[in-house]
Image: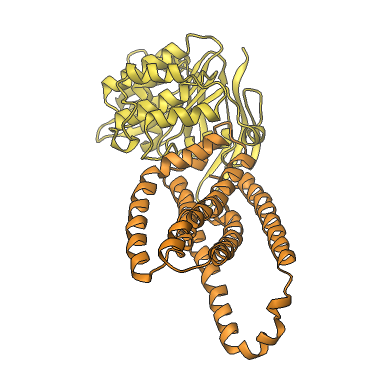
Chain colours: A orange, B yellow
Amino acid sequence: MLGLLLKDFYALRTYFKRQALVMILAYAVLSILLQSMSFLSSMLVMYGMMVYMTTFSVDEACQWNAYACTLPVTPRAAVASRLIVLLTMIWGVGLAATVIPLPFQLMLFDGSVLESFASFAALAFIYTVVGTISLPVFYKVGPERARMITTLMFILPFMAVIWIASAWKAAIAPLFDWAAFNWPLFLAACALFLVLMCVGSFFAAVRIYRKKEF
Amino acid sequence: MENAITIRGLQKHYKDFSLKDVSFDVPAGSIVGFIGENGAGKTTTIKALLGIIRNDGGSLRILGRTPEQQRRAPSEEIGVVLDTGFFFEWMRPSDISRVSARIRKSWDAEYFKAMCNRFDIPMKKPFKEFSKGMRAKLRIITALSHHPKLLILDEPTSGLDPVVRSDMLDLFLEFIQDEAHSILLSSHITSDLEKIADYIVFLHEGRIVFSLTKDEMQERFAVVKCAKEEAAGVERLGCVAGRRDSKFDAELLVSDAPAVCRAFPSMLCEQASIDDIMTFFAKGEH
């Protein structure tokens, strides 16, 4: 599996370098303009999701999957390596992007540590849910259509939440007593949900990969 | 002799194309040339054999394993060059070696490096900057660098100049020196197969036309040039595999040259090349 991860890294090395330069420049300008560094993790989690989706396009471009069928690479290893790319790009990169600028944020601008971590965790949660749903979809329909479906998976719930929050604000607000809210239980439930999503996504994708003709 | 590959009654159906009852063997220690025009089904056969696509019927064995077993846990003993599918364009040979060393237990990084040096493949240059010849060489070297027993090559020398092709053929002949090694070589470049193949399998429109040793094929197939009136006499022998007519004459591809020579001793009977056989089947009346 390490070989597959290394393959993705080498294949995307140039893409990483170019994107990283653009991100650093954009981030520096935005930080100064907005007097905040807290959005770095949001940007990088989104970037991580893009990298994850790009790995499928790269495989498609060089018809890697057909070639991989001739290598000692099991379907489980192929899918697991892609899941690791997803989790690393979202949680690993996102966490680094939350922790590293934190001292600068606190020194140069206003902000709270909890808020930075909470916004990162919320975003990473959403991206992981969408990413795990999209994993079998990528294997089933190919990267071109799966990209469109994944984009819709972001846009449609987002629009629904905005609509509910604005149209039903008065009705919903009394339902939440934030002071008495059981945050530890909520976080544990979210973590368990993510684990179940990863396991379900893995087995669904392996099943599709095994049957797929390349 | 044990077979490295055995295919019996392979069927695969698509909307506009079918492989019908494809059967042939690749005996251990031999080079089998797999020929056929574009779209004849060579790549489909190879993909079915490797488990990349599922067959709709028939029995296949590759080093004693079914394609399903091969797909679930691909063998280390097989080296493959597909007509498409390889590492990404930005990767360099040194990257390919590092990745392969982690994927294949038997990867020989020193051998890979030595072969790259031998065939002037720069280790640090991205694949995308390689010429067609360098790409083909790198694919073949990669397929050889874990010391497989069986090589399956789908159009490996396509588009290469004669010098590079000659280098590659030498490499295949070196590989086959070990009697446990075998090669299934699909190619349009029939002159290459005439040089190195022990057996020829000819696939036409999804069906096997023949599977013969090269010597048998050269002995049996001939091109007969005669007047149109004489052609009818040859056809009565029942061994005409293809016919091409010009204004006055006819050219016949016969599959039993000795019988034709015996029946018509004065007739011009030339040994058919693989090219002749393919052309007659693809374009001639048969």
From this view, report whether residue B229 is shown above or below residue B39: above
Q: Which residue is drawn at 46% across and 48% down?
A: A60
Outermost residue on the front side: it is: A107
Q: Which residue is drawn at 27% across and 22% down?
A: B162
In this picture, residue B71 sits left or right of residue A22: right
Note whether residue B136 is visible: yes
**Quadrant of residue B112 within the rendered picture:** top left
Q: Residue at x 57, y 15 (%)?
A: B28
Name the spot of residue A118 as percent of width and height, x first: 58, 65
Name the spot of residue B142 as percent of width and height, x first: 44, 26
From this view, report whether residue A188 is shown above or below residue B206: below
Note whether residue B234 is visible: no
Of A183 and A109, nearer the camera is A109
Name the spot of residue B229 as percent of width and height, x first: 33, 29
Of B243 and A45, nearer the camera is A45
The quadrant in which the N terminus of chain A is found is top right
Name the spot of residue A42 as percent of width and height, x first: 48, 63
In this picture, residue B276 sits left or right of residue B40: left
From this view, report whether residue B45 is shown above or below residue A183: above
From this view, report whether residue B7 is shown above or below residue A97: above
Q: Which residue is drawn at 37% across and 51% down?
A: A20
In this picture, residue B91 sits left or right of residue A138: left
**Quadrant of residue B221 within the rendered picture:** top left
